[in-house]
Image: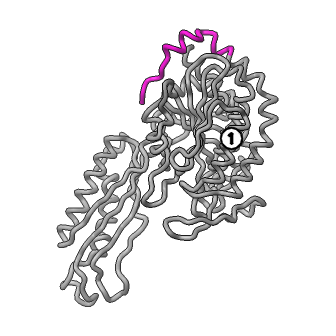
Amino acid sequence: MKAIKLAATLVLFGIGGFCQAQDAKSMLDDAFDAVEPRVIEWRRDFHEHPELSNREFRTAEKVAAHLRSLNIDSVRTGVAHTGVVGTLIGGKPGPVIALRADMDGLPVLEQTGSPFASKARGEYNGNDVPVMHACGHDTHISMLMGAAEVLANNREHLAGTVRFIFQPAEEGPPAGEDGGAAMMIQEGVLDGPNPPEAILGLHAWPGDVGTLMYRSGSFMAAADGLQINIVGKQTHGSSPWLGVDPIYVAAQIVTAIQGIPARHLDITKGPAVITIGSINGGVRGNIIPQEVEMQGTIRTFDVGVREELHAKLRQTVASIAEANGATATVTIEGYAPVTGNHPELLNKMMPTLNWAAGAENVNEGRLITGAEDFSFFQERIPGLFLMLGINDPNTPVSDRPSNHSPLFIADERALIVGVRALVGFAMDYAAASAD
């Protein structure tokens, strides 16, 4: 990550800047009260009408219309297919920062029983599927819309410029398409004469409602898609010695690659996970097939560990295939690097997080093996990525539906905390960087 740019903000603000920013935020209580019902209304609407990756047409239209209604200085649509980017220039000089929300839903059949449950359907890789906001992106969109409203209506107190990034396809674009954060970056969302210096993202999470969870440094895993194609020699199931059984080879590979994290990697540098989630081959029980295809995922938290795991996996698969007279091809496609929190930026913005949620509700968390393409933004500029708790604390943790569950639902009391965090970051960044 690049170092935080401090020189300009030091000249503009000085030591007392952070106190002034705190004073400005103290005047926003009425604004938060006013916007909260609208944030909840937007969230319910988006939840009821989810759209799949790169197909967020209705969502993008509503976002863009809202930004234009606020007289945002510029609103750009159609970024990375359906993304929306708004730019708000504050009433005081200062740096540029970015706030990001992802917009896409998932091919999941909702089972929450909510009065605004999704009945939407869409097309995913050629199949008709149900669609649900099963990962909380409906809350992300509405919270950023709320933050944009509070900041636009109080722009005279804002030092600097805010770039609102509403991103499509965080869950990954459909087969054969580009999309997501990487494509938005390719299309210039972090460019310009005055590019953003830092970025903040929030994610709904089954923690206690209204809590903010962070981790300095690595937080969420790097994720790679894995495909292994094994070619044997087809023969009758009664005479396996006359052919080469790719199913038998696949079984050996599944077992052997689990030993890579357990026995071949330095786990003190960070954990690793290899999962095979799909094995396909054969048409009936008495025919040994010609080919088997395996698909899975790899999760790591360290660049060196990631590279070592890839190399060892390829070597292991090739050796097992060769020992059995088969051939194997390993394809690894990166989804996202490690997502984390820039330590210096996190330290400087901690008072803002405490203000947003209450110090008792801001906690350091453990590593999360889920992945996020927000990490592509963080490869370019320092960033914070925080987990927003959205579950009633009286519900046992074991009973809280996970992200991507058909039962995933958010407690709406958390939404205003997210709005406060987004607004606070925008209001405080310049002064916090200068102090």
- Image coloring type: one colour
Q: Is residue 20 above or below residue 235?
A: above
Q: How many marks?
A: 1
Q: Nearer the viewer, residue 174 or 323?
A: 174
Q: What are the residue bounds of the magenta stretch?
A: 1-20
Relative to 218, 199 lies left or right: right
Q: Residue 339: where, in percent of width, then height?
A: 47, 40
Relative to 141, 341 lies left or right: left
Q: Residue 58: where, in percent of width, then height?
A: 66, 53
Relative to 415, 364 lies left or right: left
Q: Is residue 5 magenta?
A: yes
Question: Which residue appears at 48% of the width and 59% of the height?
Answer: 174
Q: Is residue 322 above or below residue 82?
A: below
Q: Nearer the viewer, residue 352 or 102?
A: 102
Q: Which picture quadrant has residue 277?
A: bottom left
Q: Amino acid at mark 1?
A: Met
Question: Which residue appears at 30% of the width and 50% of the height?
Answer: 309
Task: Tell me if I can see residue 342 in this picture.
Answer: yes
Question: Which residue appears at 69% of the width and 55% of the height?
Answer: 47
Task: Tell me if I can see residue 206 in this picture.
Answer: no
- The quadrant the C terminus occupies is top right
The residue beneath circle 1 is 143
Q: Is residue 247 magenta?
A: no
- The quadrant the N terminus occupies is top left
Q: Residue 314: where, in percent of width, then height?
A: 25, 57
Question: Which residue appears at 42% of the width and 27% of the height?
Answer: 2
Looking at the rendered structure, the secondary structure element under dot 1 is helix
Q: Residues within 10 Å of mark 1 (few under 14, many from 20)?
A: many
Q: Residue 128: where, in percent of width, then height?
A: 57, 70
